[in-house]
Amino acid sequence: MTNAAASIRIGIATVLQRIVSKSGTSIGPLVLGIFHSLLKRLRVSVEFQQSRQCPSVDEEKAFQRTLMDAMGDFANALPDYQKIEIMLLTASNIPIITQEERKVKTSDEILQKVLVKTLLKVWSGYCSDINF
């Protein structure tokens, strides 16, 4: 994890959240690249949260929530076909944990929960666009 304090990273993620909500005209692989970078930041944050170097788990969780909100806003500003791509990308990054690994890999278990919450944020925006 970077040496930046969680409050600084939360501020950056908040600004990013405001910027990405304007991305409705973005197309192509750049969208997936940006989203993949955000997923990577989430993974690094979860691993850092589990490490001994993390000074504040609560602040790290706040950073993760801010990133998830930014990712949800980013995806919800995109056309439907890109929302589906984003959901597939997010789902493909959710770690699968066997019963034996469950005792050892707590960061993967936390990452599972964080990515499922992210997927839910994207999905809820997708569902609100569908007229039944």
Image: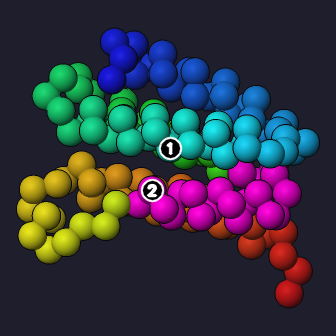
Secondary structure mostly seen in the magenta stretch: helix
Q: Earlier in the sequence, mark 1 or mark 2?
A: 1
Q: Residues within 10 Å of mark 2 (few under 14, many from 20)?
A: some
Q: As rendered, which of 118 and 35 lies closer to the eye?
A: 35
Q: x%, y% of residue 78?
A: 81, 52
Q: x%, y% of residue 57?
A: 27, 34
Q: Magenta span covers which residues? A: 74-94
Point 76% across, 29% down: residue: 19
Q: As rendered, which of 38 and 29 lies closer to the eye?
A: 29
In 3D space, how far apart are the residues under numbered discs 1 and 2 (Cα atoms)?
A: 8 Å
Q: Residue furthest front?
A: 29
Residue highlighted by disc 2: 93
Q: Is residue 13 left or right of residue 30?
A: left
Asked whether residue 103 is drawn in magenta, I would say no
Q: Residues within 10 Å of mark 1 (few under 14, many from 20)?
A: many
Residue highlighted by disc 1: 39
Point 9% across, 62% down: residue: 103
